[in-house]
Amino acid sequence: MIADILKNWDFLVLALCCSMLGKLLDMSALTALVRGRWSYGLVAVVSGILPVPGRVLVAAPVLASCSPTNRDLGLFNYVSTHSYYLWSPLESSVIIILAGLGLSYAQFLSVVWPMLVVYFGFWLWLLTSLPPPSPPIAKTAPDWRCWVQLGAVVTGIGLALVIGAPTAFVGVLVVIVIVGRPSWRELLVAGVGSLPLLAVVAAAIVLGAIARHYSAWFLQFLATLPTTTSILTCGFVAAWLLGSSTRYAGITVAIVGLLGMPLLGFVFALEFCAYLLSPTHKCLLASCYFFNSQVTTTYWYLALLCALLLSASLLALWR
């Protein structure tokens, strides 16, 4: 369990870098290129598609620089960067299900497409509900430093695919400090201001490691349950406690193996919802804290999304 905790140290590095970037970054070049709310959408789509851990933190500082006081961006950032776990063939969650159940990608999409329609409809509703970028940022004419900062962020996103997000964004932070030339006081405030976020992320890492330590026993217990309802309930609880995309995908494969392929859509939706709502999910806690979002309000909206996803999966099951 200790080894599981220690292997996530790079997520703490990424959290520190992205938290400081959120306080130092000037993205007026982005809002000059993409007007209005679509600048949020562009950032979320580009950052979210990365098949790397911590993408929610990659998008967070750029979104924050576009609208520093918008608390609704916590929910939008989280929902935006987690759509890919539903459909992307680059994601481990999708790969595990394809390999574990012997499905082609086309067969998988034929099962989950109703959930994709609901998810992207919910995302568009969130996007159109957001206020546009803050006028002080959006109306500032960008100078060369702003364009260099935008280039550094885009390059960092690309390099994250090759060398990993933590290493790439350490480099981005160095470039931003050199180009933006913040004072020592600004750097100190940015660093110290990042400590509460690091504490939240560290707590999520520890809780997740504890849950994963007992996951093998839980899966064995799952196979001994007598009824479909008890299997589904325990699977949901397990995925909720683990807060891991690979674990919820593994649980999906195990349950479908026990209950049969016709239930794949519903089981996948159920475990994905447990993953979205998990208290040990680092991205959820980090995104809420980064934007100072109300956790209870965020959970209410996520519960609505999950209810819609489960309804779509049931309709697909009964069609």
Image (spheres, helix red, strand yellow):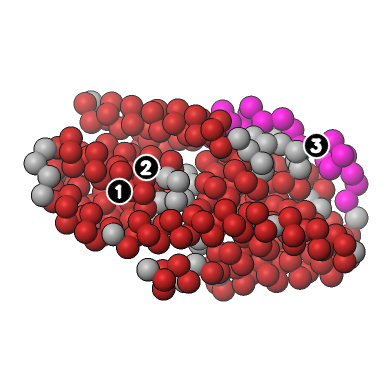
Which residue type carries mark 3? Ser
Residue 210 image point, x, y percent: 37, 60
Magenta highlight range: 122-142
Secondary element under disc 1, as helix, strand or loop, is helix
Q: In which quadrant will I find the N terminus? A: bottom left
Question: Do tag 1 and tag 2 residues touch (Cβ < 8 Å)?
Answer: yes
Secondary element under disc 2, as helix, strand or loop, is helix
Residue drawn at (31%, 39%) of the image: 270
Residue 114 image point, x, y percent: 36, 33
Which residue type carries mark 2? Ala
Q: In which quadrant will I find the C terminus? A: top left
Residue 164 image point, x, y percent: 55, 70
**Dot 2: few (<14), some (14–19), or many (≥20) neighbours within 10 Å?**
many
**Residue nearest the observer in this picture, 72 or 127:** 72
Please report whichever mark, 3 or 1, sits nearer to the chain's N-terminal start. 3
User: Which dot marks residue 238?
Assistant: 1
Which residue type carries mark 1? Ala
Residue drawn at (47%, 71%) of the image: 7
Q: Quote the CA–CA distance across marks 3 and 1.
A: 41 Å
**Residue nearest the observer in this picture, 23 or 52:** 23
Foreground: disc 1 or disc 2: 1
**Dot 3: few (<14), some (14–19), or many (≥20) neighbours within 10 Å?**
some
> Any magenta on residue 38?
no
Residue 274 found in image quarter: top left
Residue 201 image point, x, y percent: 55, 56
Determine whether, in the image, residue 310 is placed left or right of residue 53: left
Residue drawn at (67%, 58%) of the image: 195
Q: Which residue matches tag 3?
A: 134
Q: Which residue matches tag 2?
A: 274
Please report whichever mark, 2 or 3, sits nearer to the chain's N-terminal start. 3
Foreground: disc 3 or disc 1: 1
